[in-house]
Amino acid sequence: MTSTLTISQPTEHFRARQAAAAPVAVARNTAPEAGATLRIAGLSKRYQAVQALDDVSLTLLPGMRVALLGHNGAGKSTMMKIILGLIPYDGGTIEVCGEAPGSAGARAQVAYLPENAAFHPALTGQEQIRHYLALRGEDPKQALELLERVGLGHAARRRIGTYSKGMRQRVGLAQTLIGKPRLLVLDEPTSGLDPVSRRDFYALLDQLAAEGASILLSSHALTEVEARTDRILILSGGRLVAQGTLPELRHEAALPVAMHVTPAPGQTRALAEAIPEAGIGNDGLLHLTCQQSEKLALLARISALGGRVADLDVIPPSLEDIYSHFSRRDGQ
Amino acid sequence: MIAPVLATAATEYRIALRNRWVLIATLLMLLFSLVLAAAGAAPTGDVGVDRLSITVASLTSLAVYLVPLLALLMSFDAIAGETERGTLPLLLTYPVSRLQILLGKLVAHLGVLTLAVALGYGAAALAAFLFDSSAMEGLPALWRLLWSSALLGATFLGAGYALSSLSRRPSGAAGLAIGLWLGLVVLYDLGLLAMIVSDGGGQFTTEFLPVALLANPADAFRLFNLTASEAAAAAGGVGGAAGSIPLWQSLTSVALWPLLALALAWAAFRKVTP
């Protein structure tokens, strides 16, 4: 396949096709697997009138980097808090590193980064990390080294009250590195970080995953998640509507592929006649979409037009398209 | 597991130092103690006891008001503040039990309070020594006042943690704490006095009053110190009316209340969902 990948926004035409896509069965991971760091089966949680989580099942293995996606109120934070043992759940089973969530054994092996990490403003970064180290039974002397790992060595002796949001977020990251956690639960870990810090952060995660830690992170930054995680979970209205690798989800969603054809000078009209299903955009390009299965045939047809075509972009559905496809299906 | 308790205590002590709580508590206790010592030095009538014993009697009345107030001021923010700052969820994912967290805070706050009280009482005692060479006789009473003040402080710290857990916001917790202080330390005694007056030495005064006094940690503290130093008659008021309560009963109340308050705080903290 010879295609140029460019980043696209879904067009109106695109969205209309999307709505007609057939529903896809949600893959479930219920088979017991040895050494799983997290095993959830049939989990449900109700807040009065709201069903926050409904029959959620998933398994995390060591070294897996999993992204949890979902709009606000989809149940991401609820699920994380249940995994951490902070709030009770109503039904189903959950096992964290082979222990009950929130038990001393589970807490010793799980690290958490809350959304908008907050700390006591009167403490310095170093004092705060020393405290967390002591609580985990580690040597407090590692504090400076941990802060240097997240690029905060220079501010270690300043009070957290003077830190920016991104710096506080990095204190939060530093405390997740304490000990050797087997499972990291990160709620919006990159919010407030600049692009360089984000890259460093994902490099840290890769390192942790390579050492065998499982990582469950929620994010709104879909492009980052696309490049930096192995599996994607999509929550919508408390239900896990999709899970799998990006190619799997792309296949399941069966979203149309978009093509932009740039005509050779003066050939626009002739080209439009040759490809009647394409529309001419304001930019002078011809836009068309097709199903995955028709893609190669269409490419052959276009390349057969020879000199009348100056350029051709093939744009596969982005993670954003796939995400909105799955999270919309559930009556959103 | 004592390590998490000590780690929490060290951090809380540092925070108390940064928040100027150590300074405020110490200055307050010093100021009031010295004022009392100066006031105690003025009357020259012969009461037949050394000057330090008189100072201890005055300090007891001071401690009944000031120690609970300081303890509540230091503790009302302990849990509600963590909830509001958003630091509680993360803390609760650490391998630390809620009891350990409470104990760590208690150790730090009680340390600050005891330090302030000891410095205040010490200054007052020093003043008594300057004016009266026989003041040594009052030292046991001073020592008794010091450790019973620490127990009184622990009781109200525990009560403060309980209120802090029950209330979702620090402002709410502060309101509850002031209410508790007013109720137990000020209004409780006024109510009892009113009932004694209207009862005129009847059944209420003989049967209900001792129980009512022992049930209130502040009154039990006052009773214990005044009974132990046989100064109840001099103190008058509610203390005088209850001179018949044996020492072991008020001592039991003083010793049990901190445990009870801590149990209450623990029960309330366990119900907090971050």
Image: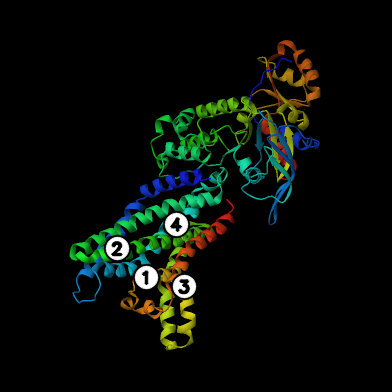
Dot 1 lies on which element?
helix
Residue B228 badge: 1
User: Are circles 3 and 2 on residues that touch, CB within 8 Å?
Assistant: no
Residue B214 badge: 3
Mark 4 or 1 closer to N-term?
4
* Cα distance in 3D space between marks 4 and 2: 30 Å
Subunit bearing disc 4: B
Mark 2 or 1 closer to N-term?
2
User: Are circles 2 and 1 on residues that touch, CB within 8 Å?
Assistant: no
In this view, the residue farthest toward the top is A307
Left or right of residue A106: residue B90: left
Mark 3 or 2 closer to N-term?
2
Q: Type of residue at label 2?
A: Leu
Subunit bearing disc 1: B
Dot 4 lies on which element?
helix
Residue linked to disc 2: B139
Dot 2 lies on which element?
helix
Q: Position of residue A40 (x, y in %)?
A: 72, 41
* Cα distance in 3D space between marks 4 and 1: 30 Å
Q: Is label 4 or label 1 in front?
A: 1
